[in-house]
Image (cartoon, rainbow, N blue to C red):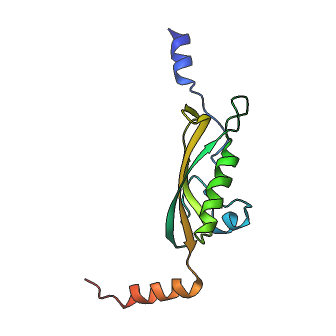
């Protein structure tokens, strides 16, 4: 009984804290500015939704990696004039009629607001009547 109580109390606790959320500055330093989460330290507008099916070349090729999926999303986002992709998601590889392994990926292509746009937005918010 004591052994059960001790093992029940000893959960798998990872002493490593989670990484900090990405920031505007860290995202802009990336070669492929695509993240699974969101950016909260700089306002932006969504310029479009990017969606891609990333396939492996042959039955014997490796499944598409996260970095390959992110590169593919970024290529489409650049065509929309985006600065980055946020809220990127992709599924597990699956076999389809036309592919030996494909991952569906989606994300939001975003354009960060300029300092002038941020100032104008603040001015509009400050000028709004208070209830």
Where does residue 71 sit, x and y in percent of width and height? 68, 54
Query: Which residue of the protein is positioned furthest toward the top in this rendering?
Result: 1
Rendered image quadrant of residue 10: top right
Eyeballing the image, is 122 above or below 73? Answer: below
Eyeballing the image, is 114 above or below 56? Answer: below
Rendered image quadrant of residue 94: top right
Residue at horizontal 54 percent and vertical 40 percent from the top:
91
Relative to 29, is 82 on the left or the right?
left
Residue at horizontal 29 percent and vertical 85 percent from the top:
130
Where does residue 66 sit, x and y in percent of width and height? 66, 45
Q: For residue 79, say whether it is visible.
A: yes
Q: For residue 34, say whether it is visible.
A: no
Residue at horizontal 64 percent and vertical 48 percent from the top:
69
Observer-nearest residue: 39 or 62? 62
Query: Which residue of the protein is positioned furthest toward the front in this rendering?
Result: 98
The quadrant in which the C terminus is found is bottom left
Rendered image quadrant of residue 37: bottom right
Eyeballing the image, is 55 above or below 60? Answer: below
* Count of numbered tags: 0
Observer-nearest residue: 123 or 72? 72
Where does residue 127 sit, x and y in percent of width and height? 37, 91
Observer-nearest residue: 39 or 93? 93
Observer-nearest residue: 82 or 113? 82
Relative to 29, is 79 on the left or the right?
left
Relative to 5, is 29 on the left or the right?
right
Residue at horizontal 68 percent and vertical 29 percent from the top:
59
Where does residue 70 sit, x and y in percent of width and height? 65, 52
């Amino acid at each position: 009984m004591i052994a059960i109580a001790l093992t029940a109390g000893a959960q798998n606790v990872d002493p490593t804290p989670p990484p900090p959320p990405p920031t505007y500055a860290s995202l802009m330093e990336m070669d492929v500015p695509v993240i699974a989460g969101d950016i909260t330290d700089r306002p932006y507008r969504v310029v479009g939704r990017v969606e891609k099916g990333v396939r492996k070349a042959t039955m014997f090729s490796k499944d598409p990696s996260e970095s390959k999926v992110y590169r593919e999303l970024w290529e489409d986002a650049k065509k929309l004039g985006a600065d980055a992709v946020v809220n990127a998601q992709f599924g597990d590889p699956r076999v389809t009629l036309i592919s030996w392994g494909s991952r569906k990926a989606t994300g939001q292509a975003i354009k960060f607001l300029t300092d002038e746009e941020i100032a104008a937005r603040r001015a509009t918010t400050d000028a709004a009547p208070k209830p």
